[in-house]
Image (cartoon, rainbow, N blue to C red):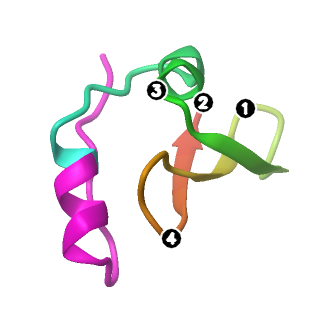
């Protein structure tokens, strides 16, 4: 079961509103949404962090994936 998007730290109101209206459950969803992937950081053999810039907003989002 996927977890809802949780905002941690600061974020511009535009970025928070943009993410709140989108259902992102898989990396495929993130790519179809139009986000640009900047980095995939391997934490261990099961967990990766995916750093993306969302479409139509400034800032970065980091998705913890398993």
Residue visible at 59% across and 25% down in the picture: 31
At mark 3, the secondary structure is helix
Please say if the residues under marks 2 and 1 sit with CB atoms less than 8 Å apart: yes
> Which one is earlier in the sequence, the residue at label 2 or at label 1?
1
Q: For mark 3, what is the residue?
A: 33
Q: Is residue 58 magenta?
A: no
Distance, label 4 to label 1, CA atoms, is: 26 Å
Query: Seen in the image, is 9 located left or right of residue 13?
Result: right
Q: For mark 4, what is the residue?
A: 59
- Mark 2 or 3, closer to the camera: 3
> Which one is earlier in the sequence, the residue at label 2 or at label 4?
4
Q: For mark 1, what is the residue?
A: 46
Q: Tell me if residue 9 comes above or below residue 54 in the rendering.
A: below
- Residue stretch rendered in magenta on the structure: 1-18
At mark 1, the secondary structure is loop
> Which one is earlier in the sequence, the residue at label 4 or at label 1?
1
> Which one is earlier in the sequence, the residue at label 3 or at label 1?
3
Residue visible at 50% across and 70% down in the picture: 59
- Crowd band around label 2 with a 10 angstrom C-alpha radius: few (<14), some (14–19), many (20+): few
Depth check: 60 or 44 in front? 60
Q: For mark 2, what is the residue?
A: 66
Residue visible at 26% across and 55% down in the picture: 6
At mark 4, the secondary structure is loop
- Crowd band around label 4 with a 10 angstrom C-alpha radius: few (<14), some (14–19), many (20+): few
């Amino acid at each position: 079961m996927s977890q809802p998007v949780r905002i941690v730290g600061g974020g511009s109101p535009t970025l928070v509103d943009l993410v709140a209206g989108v259902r992102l459950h898989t990396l495929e969803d993130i790519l179809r949404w139009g986000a640009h992937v900047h980095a995939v950081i391997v934490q261990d053999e099961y967990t990766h962090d995916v750093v993306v810039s969302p479409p139509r907003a400034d800032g970065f989002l980091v998705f913890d994936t398993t």
